[in-house]
Image (cartoon, helix red, strand yellow):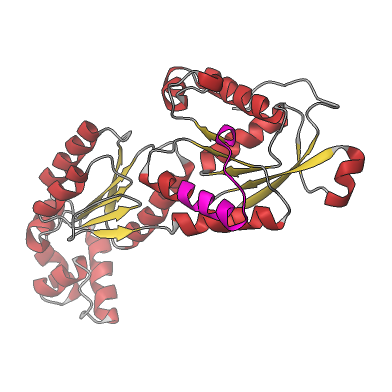
Amino acid sequence: MSATLRDVARRAGVSHTTVSNVLNNVPKVGEQTRERVLQAMADLQFEPNLAAKSLYTKRSYIVGYMVPAITNEFFMKLARAAERVLYREDTGMFLCGTGLDPKREADYTCRLIRHRADGIVVNYTASNRTVRDAVRAGIPVVAIESPIDEPSASLVCLDNQGAAMLGVEHLCELGHRRIAVIALDFESNVNQERLRGFHSGLKLHDIEPVSGLEISLATSEKENGCFDYGAELDKSPVTAHRRFSEIVERLMFSDKPPTAVFCFDYHTTLLLIQSLMRMGLTPGMQDQETRPKTNRMSQNLVRPDGQISEITESHPKMNRVPPGPLLP
């Protein structure tokens, strides 16, 4: 027969209320008493009844965490950080990959409401309904980089426009005037803010935007070889990466190639570096004074999160290395 809460209380020489307080991490229990109760639990191999605990505390000890894609390194870094905090609080995390599908988000929200989740973190949402339904069910919500109109929810946002302006300022200080920008899309609220910051940064330095240097990977238009990268990625990652490389190659082999590239996100940055490497371009720093003599040009990759990678390349029309296999 398994040990009960009262068995633990007798073993530790305390009341059953004290044992309950230890189980629920009530801070008023003294450290020595807490240690005595924990030792009694270990001696008796006591396993708390989580269902009873939830009824008593009115908590589920579960927090939902919604992300657009569980394969995206940026979203998963935030999820891992959240999981570490929740673990310290004896709370589990229910990870939900939504794919930015409103129906899928609504389904996950209903499940979390049914399980009486203690809270929901929404790391970018496709629908305001997700946040609204959770709040109306009495569940606290924290939205990260999500356009919401629910005043009861907490919102965490980056200064995307200001960060983009700083990125452009950095490139202009290095002497760049032809700056390309590549993003997964220009339609999301986050990337619209970044694009406004990009344009504002150019304007501050009297640089006119060039449409041919602004590349979105979320277009279905066939003009200039553009394609819907996300849709292609679902069908064939190899084909999606190859077609992205073709876009970069056309950009770099154009009559007036950019001398710098601004990437809106982590994923695009990695794709671009991979494509440049396949073209025989080497990451590094090139002394600008030697560029005219050696026919080399400095490529700078800037991300709005403040991370900057500088790429130095041989001119694409000279000493070109044959393309190698795609990196995974």
Residue 190 position within the rendered picture, expressed as x and y whole percent measured from the top left: 40, 47
Residue 246 screen position, x and y as percent: 62, 22
Please state the extent of the stretch shown in magenta in the rendering.
195-213
Specify whether 322 is left or right of 202.
Answer: right
The reply to whether the magenta stretch includes residue 205 is yes
Q: Which residue is drawn at 59% across and 27% down?
A: 328
The reply to whether residue 306 is visible in this rendering is: no
Left or right, 47 with respect to 144, comes to left
Tell which of 223 and 142 is nearer to you.
223
Residue shown at 41% from the left, 22% from the top: 231
Farthest residue, direction right: 293
Q: Which of 163 and 11 is in front in this view?
A: 163
Residue at position x 68%, y 38% in the image: 258
Q: In this view, does 127 lie above or below 318?
A: below
Q: In this view, does 168 lie to the left or right of 108?
A: right
Q: Is residue 321 visible?
A: yes
Main SS class of the magenta portion in the image: helix
Q: Is residue 97 highlighted in magenta?
A: no
Q: Horizontally, is 108 left or right of 199 in the view?
A: left
What is the total number of numbered labels drawn onto the structure image?
0
In the image, what residue occupies the spot 31% across and 35% down? 100
Question: Residue 212 occupies which quadrant of the picture?
Answer: top right
